[in-house]
Image (tube, helix red, strand yellow):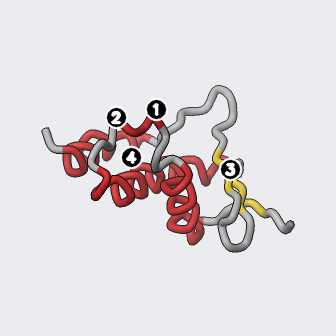
Amino acid sequence: MQVRIARSEDSEGIAGTLAAAFFSDPVWGWVFAEPEQRKMQHEAWFRLLVRSALPHLWVWTTPAYEAVSVWVPPGLPELSESDEAQLEPMLEELLGA
């Protein structure tokens, strides 16, 4: 299996894999409770997390996104300042007030 460090153009594919993996997860299920909207909501959420993690070079993927991993090195923030500023508006857009 070929594995490589992910690039920005991989964000959509990685977010799609993570959204599918966590679609029925009981921890995330209550956050994105509407099944009809959950895939889109999960993908938006994971795109934000992946985008912030990519600069750390700890996001890995296979060529067709069959397997992905997203890590943030110890001591570094999970979200960049700009992504953190987008978090609340994004969640309000996805979930409402």
Residue, disc 3: 69
Tell me which residue sits at (72%, 56%) in the image: 60
Label whose residue precedes the other's in the sequence (1 or 4): 1
Residue, disc 4: 82
Label 4: element kind: helix
**Residue type, label 3:** Ser
* For the residues bearing labels 2 and 1, Cβ distance under 8 angstroms: yes
List the single residue furthest toward the right: 1
Tell me which residue sits at (40%, 46%) in the image: 83
Q: Nearer the viewer, residue 73 or 29?
A: 29
The quadrant the C terminus occupies is top left
User: Callout 1: few (<14), some (14-19), or many (20+) C-alpha neighbours within 10 Å?
Assistant: few
Label whose residue precedes the other's in the sequence (2 or 4): 2
Judged by depth in the image, the label closer to the viewer, 3 or 4, is 3
Label whose residue precedes the other's in the sequence (3 or 4): 3
**Residue type, label 1:** Val
In the image, is residue 91 above or below residue 65? above
